[in-house]
Amino acid sequence: MIKYALRRLLSTIPVLWIAVTACFFVLRLAPGGPFDGERPLPPVILKNLAIHYNLDKPLIQQYLIYVGDLLRGDLGPSFASEDFTVAQQIMIGLPYTFTIGTAAFVLAIIIGVAVGCLGALYQNKTPDYILGALILVGVVLPNFLIAPILQLIFGIHLAWFPVGGWGDGSIKYLILPIVVLALPHAGRISRITRGSMIEVMNQNFIRTAKAKGIGPRLTVMRHALKPALMPVVSYLGPAASYLLTGSLVVESIFGLPGIGRYFVNAALNRDYGMVLGTVIFYMVLIVFLNLLVDIAYAWLDPKVRNR
Amino acid sequence: MNQFTKKFLASAMLGTLLAFSAHAATLNIHNGGDPQSLDPQKLSGDWENRIAGDIFEGLVTEDAKDNPVPGQAESWTISPDGKVYTFKLRDGIKWSDGQPVTAGDFVFAFQRLVDPKNAADYAYLQFTIKNAEKINKGEITDLNQLGVKAIDEKTLEITLENPTPYFLNALMHYTAYPLPKHVVEAKGQDWVKIGNIVTNGPYKPVEWVPGSHVTTVKNDQWYGAKDLKIDGAKFFVLEDQEAALKRYRAGEFDILTDFPTDQYEWMKKNLPGQAHVAPFSGLYYYVINSTKPPFADKRVRQALSMAINREVIGPQILGTGELPAYSWVPPGTANYGEPAYVSWKDLPYKDKVEEAKKLLKEAGFGPDHPLTAELKYNTNDNHKRIAVAIASMWKPLGVNVELVNAETKVHYDQLQRGEVQIGRAGWLADYNDPDNFLNLLVTGVQMNYGRWSNPEYDKLIKDGNAETDLKKRAEIFKKAEQLALDDSAALPIYYYVSKNVVSPKIEGFVDNIQDIHRTRWLSMKE
């Protein structure tokens, strides 16, 4: 398994290199530069800035400098935040994004699997319809709509939770963003679980279990849940990437200092170093998460394990 | 002392500290974007100025109304030719680490600002100082040639290239703040990191979480620390104005530095007296490319300008009542008096449209021979609404407008390249003086996006800036402004307003034309 994981990781290096190279040149070709803005800078200042950031050099030389720094583990400077390097900013934002993302991920799985199982058990009965409708709301309503509604109800009118900010990181600050981030994924997981569970429940080994007189709850927990979770696991890879790399909307609405906002802001600011830094970070993370999903798959399915 | 007693005493002390901190007056400000740096020579935005102006102080500082008042300098004299300023520093001024602030710290800061190696974005704001521009351009390499000298530890002499009546205003800008030479030299680029940074303003930064907030606390070494009513501030990063307003309503913010304009009516009813909308030293305008036909024709430019119904834009399109602009310099600008206005300012709108039609017809355009134009603006709901409205105002003249939007970087790149027929632009004053606006129309200036050029105008601006008598200078500038307006050099649309929301528990917040509200002038009711 370790060999497999290492091979997988090594095989991503050329992909990463191609992505970084493409991103580097596309960014430089995009119109507008990092120092364009409502207040144009005098040529002398622009020249000084270009020298300071090596932007005065030919493009290929800039690229070689960047790759050279990258190989030494240096993601370079950020144009928009001069007091922190790109790596420092990512490291500062990471704990916030990971805390919210991990909690939302766990919550989404718990709610999604539980609701999906209940839906399957009460298939086409009232609880199934009610849960189905609620889940549909969670999936269909975008988080930029749900977030302000929850802020208004639970933050302003009921004053149960702060409307935004990280505060001291206590749970009361985190509940609303976690819920908003988790809801759509919980909805999708529940739909996948429900469908998969119904399919599994109709299989022969479940009929056998039932025939032996095992109750429905025990049948689900002991026999049906594990195989029913296989499709859910395939969904967890992309879901985890999304949640753990942060949500721009949720971090923006709740004023959270995570890295989700970096990418878009950096692209708009033509903050070349920051864009490339976040691209590299996301890619490495996605590779790692996909690897974890594959390992989980192997654990769940002996056929995969023995392959 | 047994373990229990120790724990009890520790808990009691912690409790007392927490109780104390609970009563400490901390100001929570919604500050918009993330600061680029805490180094005053690396800043460019008003959200950064709010922090920098609280933690640093220049020779001259601003009062609650944004008038220049003595800061680190207790007094100054100006030579008869208006070129040499001599500042006497206050006694006992210190950095937050207790080291004295000396004239040498100012010399060091100004030299660092103009040193091309440091690539300070805003160095050009101090180009009025002798040799500043030449040093920044690399034409002079000896930094000691800069016109800033320490006569002794307490006396600083600044020599200017030319007399500059707004120089004291420019000294309020963060580019003129001193730097702690002893820390910058010891720590290099890291001098500005929390833990290293020392400041000379009323407050000092103690925490910075990028993307979240900057926290400041009272600087006990500042000469007026005992009079400060606010113990510190938290400047929150949050660009979503809707979310910021919700957090204000929940009591999480005491001041919002901007708000969604469509909420203004709601706020007037539900948060009476809390939304402050006040004149702001800024102009929203359209540039018009006067180098290429058909806009090279003055009649076309004037017709387009006359047909803009400015009276409806502030109240109806924006909803916050921005005043219509018929001058190039906003009223209330220092060293100026009443600005010059377009001659047709007071005509009824109907007559303006008729006159515009006539002018266009003379220029060869009309419903039978429509004028087509491309109007570019940067992506923003308000810019879009205004562009749509103005395009519809031009429609009756037989002008067909194609609206083109682009993100800010692309838009300004196009403006600078002159790749625009008509384009949206805006200007917020860096310092309170008419020159800051009039300079935008001088030939060859980068911000002269419409490439309008008039040698007489250029000469008047040059003459005005060489004039030391403020009254005569204002007259010269007004002639220049009238010239530009008569020629429809660009199309002024409205004067900006500042938009703050201030909690009723905050006292001392005074609306002013530069929208500067330092924490040291504020207090908080229990």
Image (cartoon, coloured by chain):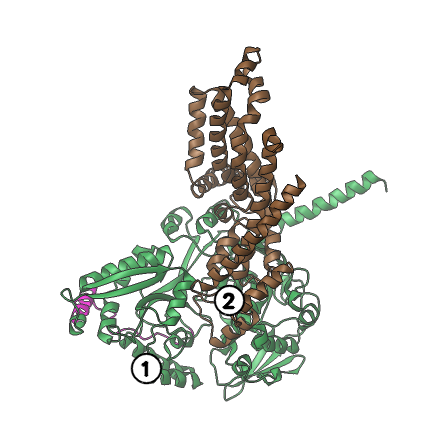
Percent x, y of residue A276 = 54, 57
Q: Which residue matches tag 2?
A: B44
Tell which chain the image draws in brown.
A
2 and 1 marks on the same chain:
yes
Does the magenta-highlighted stretch encompass residue A295? no
Amino acid carrying label 2: it is Ser
Which segment is the magenta one?
Answer: B334-358
Q: Mark 2 lies on which chain?
A: B
Q: Which residue matches tag 1?
A: B454
Looking at this view, is A149 or B517 the one in front?
Answer: A149
Extreme residue in the front direction: A307
Extreme residue in the bottom direction: B81
Amino acid carrying label 1: it is Asn
Visible in this render: residue A59?
yes
Question: Where A182 falls versus A133 (above or below)?
Answer: below
Percent x, y of residue B157 = 59, 83
Percent x, y of residue A201 = 50, 20
Does the magenta-highlighted stretch encompass residue B356? yes
Residue B308 falls left or right of residue A174 = left
Residue A219 falls left or right of residue B512 = right
Percent x, y of residue B405 = 35, 59
Colour in which chain B is drawn: green
Extreme residue in the right direction: B1
